[in-house]
Image (cartoon, rainbow, N blue to C red):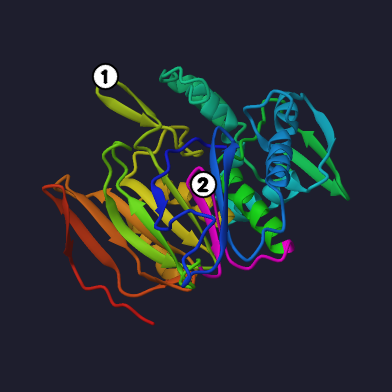
Amino acid sequence: MRNYSVIISLFFLFSCTSKNSEKVFHTLSGFTQGTTYTITVVDDSLHFKQSEIDHLLAEFDTILSTYIDESKITQLNNSTTYFAFEDNYHFFKNCYNHSLAIYNETNELFDPSIYPLVKQWGFYKKSNTVPAQAKIDSIIHFIGFKPELFHTVQFQNDSVYFQKKDERFKLDFNAIAQGYSVDVLAEFIENRGHKNYYIEIGGELRVKGKNSSEKDWTIGIDSPGNSSNHSTLTTLSVTNCGIATSGNYRNFFEIAGKKYGHILNPKTGYPVNSDIISVTVVAPNATLADAYATYFMIIGKEKTIQFVEKHNNIQVVLMYLDKMNQTVVYQSGKGEGGRLKGEGRRMKEEGGRLKEEGGRRKDEG
């Protein structure tokens, strides 16, 4: 749902004709969620049609897109007390449950009820205004995703029964929905019997198995600068994982010399003043990677590194400014089989080039 510029690139030649030493692969691309998608499947034949992918993504948007007036989440947000609807694919149910789990895990900093704050700050319509403190304070009083606080929900078969306790309570799953949509496609493709694939929607990725050269997928992490003049910071060799990137370097506005980014802290009501420029997250799936990327932007570099050190299935590539205002890249490990292994790696940018500092990278496998 977010329209981030893609700063993750696939080091892979898209073609339907393979060299003799490579396996056959098929690539589809199209438009969705205000951005593009690309799917590459390594197999002798493709067991689905592109029209099926487009239909699935369109159905996803009719449930979860806050940018569609007739979507179920928009109707829910516009309701005053009670709203019931059909959720045949369980898109809302799954996204809600994933979000609630992460909300609880992150001390309520990942909060999908942040919609009124995002709207007040003007990020939906690019109005570029700083709200009055009194307005922010009033909104914070009805922010909180905890069930029974401002809402209740019941899921029965394909039906959703949603009850608001405050009509101002509204939901925005944009910090997780795009990653979840990638996982939806992954499940669909796997159910059709494919075991080697690459899926990308607006920079959110899911990869499984091997590429056409029978190797892990090599993903390039690009510098978050001008898209026409970017450089590759590092590459990851990964499989069986999801990848997502978040940052405030594109979606922000500036007033009186101060920048206001689109990622908000639900506890303060203000855009985060993070020391992280961008964070790329590698996780077991794209849903987790997407949500954690937002959470890491809120908590900052040090707490992010501490979090990753306690969760071996989560790894990151951080780009941040040090005390000397120099760009530093921290990579928590070297990729192997969807789990990145190795010692932390720091690189400092000098004269447009990255120079490694503070330790050595250890490759395994």
| The quadrant where residue 166 appears | top right
| The quadrant where residue 247 appears | top left
Task: Say if the magenta span includes residue 209.
Answer: yes
Please name the residue that numbered disc 2 is placed on. Answer: 109
Residue type beneath disc 1: Ala
Q: Residue at x 45, y 70 (%)?
A: 310
Residue 343 vs 303, above or below: the answer is below
Q: Nearer the viewer, mark 1 or mark 2?
A: 1
Q: Is residue 285 visible?
A: no
Mark 1–mark 2 Cα distance, whole angstroms, equals 28 Å
In the image, taking residue 324 as reference, residue 302 lies left or right, namely right
Image disc number at residue 256: 1
Q: Is residue 75 visible?
A: yes
Question: Could you tell me which secondary element the residue under label 1 belongs to?
Answer: loop
Q: Quadrant of the C terminus?
A: bottom left
Q: Quadrant of the N terminus?
A: top right
User: How far from the left and from the top, in percent, is residue 184?
Assistant: 67, 52
Q: Nearer the viewer, residue 287 or 256?
A: 287
User: How far from the left and from the top, in percent, is residue 30?
Assistant: 58, 40
Question: Could you tell me which secondary element the residue under label 2 belongs to?
Answer: loop
Residue found at the far left of this picture: 351
User: How far from the left and from the top, in percent, is residue 80?
Assistant: 77, 24
Residue 236 vs 161, above or below: the answer is below
Q: Nearer the viewer, residue 70 or 138?
A: 70
Q: Residues within 10 Å of mark 2 (few under 14, many from 20)?
A: many
User: How far from the left and from the top, in percent, is residue 170?
Assistant: 66, 31
Residue 52 vs 329, above or below: the answer is above
**Circles 1 and 2: CB atoms closer than 8 Å:** no
| The quadrant where residue 344 appears | bottom left
Give the magenta-colored segment's residue range: 191-210
